[in-house]
Image: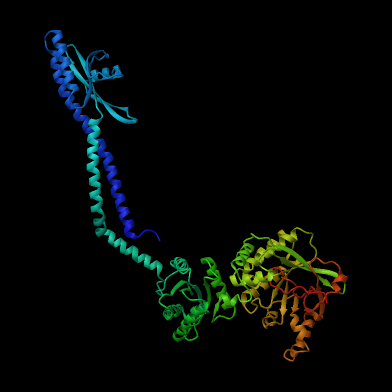
Amino acid sequence: MGLPFLVRWVLAVSSAVLLAGLVEFGVAQQQIVDRGLQDSLRNYGALSEQLEEALAANSDPAIRDAAIAAELDHIKHGYGTVYAGLFAADGRLFAEAGKEPGRTRADPERLAEVASTGTAAVETEELADHDASVDAYEFFIPVSAPGATLILNIDQHPDIISELVADQRQRGLLGLLVAVLCAIPLSYMLGGRTLHLRQLRAQREADEDALTGLASRRPFRPALESALTRGAATPVTLALLDLDNFKRINDRLGHSYGDRVLTGFADSFAELRASDTAFRLGGDEFAVILPGLDEYGAAEALERVRTALLGRFTGVTFSAGIASSTVADPAALQELWERADAALYEAKRRGRRQSVTFGSMAAGHTVSAEKIEALTALVADNSPITVAFQPIWDLRRGVVLAHEALLRLPTDSPISGPQEAFELAERLGLAAALDARARREVLTAVKARRWDGLLFMNIHPDALTHLDIDALTAELAAAGLEPEDVVLEVTEQAGLDHAEPIRTLTRAHERGFRLALDDMGRSNAGLRALTLVRFDIIKIDGEVIARLGKDPLIGGHRGCGHDLCRAERGVGCRRRHRGTPDALNPAAARTQRHRTAARTGRTGLSAGPAGAAAGRTQHPPPRPG
């Protein structure tokens, strides 16, 4: 969340004033040093005039030398002077006062320069003083003497200048403190308050959805984290909601009416408790955090919302997925989100217009965090998958016509097998990604062996809509296969009553892939698909075959089954058998129970589901009959 605005404002203003004060102090300090040195030069220049008078006096040399010594001693005891010496331009010493041990004579070149220019000068030198460095100042003052120009060399104690600087530092710090105390309220009154109000308004706009007035996506995650932290001893429930067929509402009735529906939906959340918080995550996606309620209590609350929404807009409803973090089954934020999202997916799969709890969805099929992590590792290529190839036999000729790719998960995986993996992937919206991983592993296995015959590859319904046929063709080429070598197998539940899957299958057929329709007879979608797509292979569901002629409810379909067998150039029914993976013995294969299937088109191949085929959930393999 960061620091509050006022705290940040105070820090910003204080920092700016202090920085400006420090810069000003640095400049002022140098000015004080320069001004102090100039003052010392003027004072020493005045004292040198008295020394000139002593040098010009027409008296006894002894008296004159005594007068010079007295003047030097007078200079030495004023203005912090520690040494005063009178030198000739060539460096010869005439007299001195305050001689210090270890002091070197003045630089003859410097003395000659001052004598020639007749201008006083000052130099700074660094001295060691009790393990610290201090600046000492050395002055050169030209002194007129009969017949020559002498140089007055003076060393001044560093405390003279440093005391001036220290005094100015104290006054400067006091001034900075006063400036900060005055600048903060003045700046806030002159502009900071307006900026603060704008910042509050911008934050409020970022945290609030402009259309519905609900909280937006930005504060959702922090709010959920806070609820999970506070509610460690009580349940915290998350509900994810989607308006059903909202795109159709927008397309048919216009976006203005769609906005009214969204606003009405938001108003319907008034049926919730004051402690419950609703969020609009974007579009027609909403979320509700319900602290203190379990899944069933949350489901009852959402039914009140559903009733309120129907009262505002007849026929408009929503799907919801509900998941709870409880003391007995705590869930972290990401896991709780995934559970609610899986429940929402299940609600849509069941036909929408309902709320599904994760607990009811997982009844009899536990979805633990360990299984979710294992599935995530499968999708991300962080867990191994092995591939087996189940042969498809022509029992009349005793030859293998094709192989179907089957998946095998690691033996230590918490997921029982490929069927559970794809069921869980469907709930978590990862089925298409898992299907893509399965295809990659199958083609890798194909490339590593000498391949002969057709390859059956199952495509999961969730992957069919967005399957890139061109990319799949390139992957096959890398494995040494052509589209004509591959049979893409889909189930009757693969959304064949929608346009996009039909377009994908048509595109695949045009590129040379053979197509197989599995589980024919479980619904009516397959019958409609037969009028839109040319399938090379049709696999009639075993339950339908078993009940033909026995169940009066489907007795009328017997003729349909025979018609299917006679379709496409009058080819009749055939029985084909799928053996155990990599089996090569036709005699052993004949001891297995076979399933009857109808074929159309070119290949003359058919096979019922056995095991979990790559990319789709299948039934267990047939056992010896």
Instruction: Judge from the rendering whether residue 332 lies leftward or rightward of residue 172; answer left or right.
Output: right
Labels in figure, total: 0
Residue projecting furthest to the top: 60
Above or below residue 73? Residue 182 is below
Instruction: Let me know if residue 114 appears in the view.
Output: yes
Residue 7's spot in the image, x, y percent? 33, 57
Instruction: Judge from the rendering whether residue 167 lies leftward or rightward of residue 344; answer left or right.
Output: left
Instruction: Let me know if residue 251 appears in the view.
Output: no
Instruction: Judge from the rendering whether residue 307 lies leftward or rightward of residue 426; answer left or right.
Output: left
Residue 463's spot in the image, x, y percent? 64, 70
Residue 360's spot in the image, x, y percent? 58, 78
Instruction: Judge from the rendering whether residue 466 lies leftward or rightward of residue 284; answer left or right.
Output: right
* Residue 166 picture quarter: top left
**Quadrant assignment for the C terminus:** bottom right
Residue projecting furthest to the bottom: 552
Residue 186's spot in the image, x, y percent? 23, 56
Residue projecting furthest to the left: 58
Question: For this rendering, which residue is in front, 225 or 86?
Answer: 225
Question: For this rendering, which residue is in front, 443 or 611?
Answer: 611
**Quadrant assignment for the N terminus:** bottom left
- Residue visible at 47% across and 80% down in the picture: 301
Above or below residue 186? Residue 91 is above
